[in-house]
Image: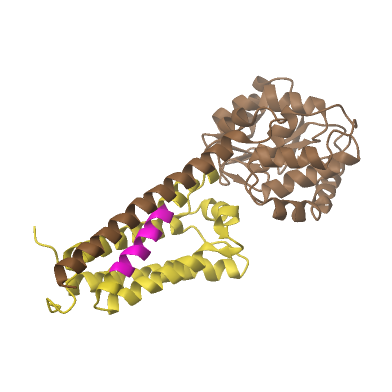
Amino acid sequence: MSIPSEGTLRRAIAFFATLGVGVAAYIAIVEAGGDSPVCLAGGSGCKTVADSSYSHVAGINIAIFGVIGYLLLLASAFLNSDGARLGGFLVALGGFGYSIFLTYIEIFKIEAICQWCVASAVLMTILFALSAIRLVGYGGTDGAIPDRA
Amino acid sequence: MNGADRRSKLMQMAAGAVFLAIAVVVVLIIVNAADEEGGDTNIEGASEVSRELRGIPQQGMVLGDPAAPVELIEFGDLQCPVCAGYAEEILPPIIENQVRRGEVKIDFRNFTIVGPQSLDAGAAALAAGAQGRGWNFVELFYRNQGGENSGFADDDFLEAVAKSAGVKDSARWNRERAELGVKVEETSTEAEELGLQGTPTFALRGPQTDGIEVIGTPGSTGDLEEAIDEAS
């Protein structure tokens, strides 16, 4: 099976990273206003998760880190270099790993599921896969193969 | 450096990062799991309480689905030994069945009649409730309750219960419990206005009740279930 062109991968990364910025920014803005994200399907999971101590690291809402991570991934999609490929992969790897940890925390420690966190975890998983395919497929091609997009 | 060398180096760095990420996630999960099992050695019953309440929604001091048709209100005093007996003997089957199924939610409201430390304990429970651990706090408090007005419910005891109950942000819990005494007094006043004489006293609100109906202190789980059925 042939892998998609790097241009296609970059456009997909840009698309999902933009969605991620939206999700993380929503959580960050709502919580900055003293509220909790609204669970669209009802229930109190979002409030329970937002009220937990895991929602902050060193006093900073983790949604802020999410916004920064997604913006970095968005930036990596606009750059055509090995640095962008590796940088995007590392950011997505960090986000994906932290999403696994947070999902574990939601299920086993907080015992509540926040659909916004799940949405972010799914987006980060997709971005990790796309960034990994981009790095493996096109890493080391700086100046060697022109972007076919 | 040619393309092949550069690619080889990139793959090595990526592989190293993947191994590092896996190690960090595993360590984080192990550390957090160990933290849950540890808890305060002086507080007993943390794992039983955790098992009893696992997966049941908690919002403030309300245990159960917020949309449950029947609300069972318990007016209790954390220092009251009869309340502790109810928590250990009468209520667990209700929690395991009707509450877990989403048919009933239980609202714990402080009615402080035993002594001054009941107020501190009640506020501490409300502050735990603000972090989704109100019922874990109440259940653990009852399981480790000392003699009425013996002074057992001091700051050290409350902190140990909160920690074992899974209250994560202890600074926030400390800050909020100092402010929540007024809420404890509000529910105590509500209980007095309802004409309640002692704790625990239960009330029900459901499709078949006219607002909040006080049902007193049912003597068994069966009596309580019967009252719930009538209110449903």
- Does any portion of residue A139 appear in the rendered image? no
Q: Position of residue B171 (x, y in %)?
A: 71, 54
Query: Is B96 left or right of B172, judged from the image as shown?
Result: left
Q: Position of residue A134 (x, y in %)?
A: 22, 66
Depth order, front residue of A140/A51: A140
Q: Measuring 79% from the left and 31% from the top, which residue is drawn there? A: B200
Q: Residue furthest front?
A: B1
Q: Measuring 48% from the left and 54% from the top, which residue is drawn there? A: A114
Depth order, front residue of A8/B183: A8
| Magenta extent | A86-99
Residue B73, image quadrant: top right
Q: Colour of chain B?
A: brown
Query: Is B75 left or right of B209, judged from the image as shown?
Result: right
The secondary structure making up most of the magenta span is: helix
Residue B79 to residue B125: above or below: above
Q: Colour of chain A?
A: yellow
Query: Is B199 left or right of B91, judged from the image as shown?
Result: right
Image quarter (top left, top right, bottom left or bottom right) of the C terminus of chain B = top right
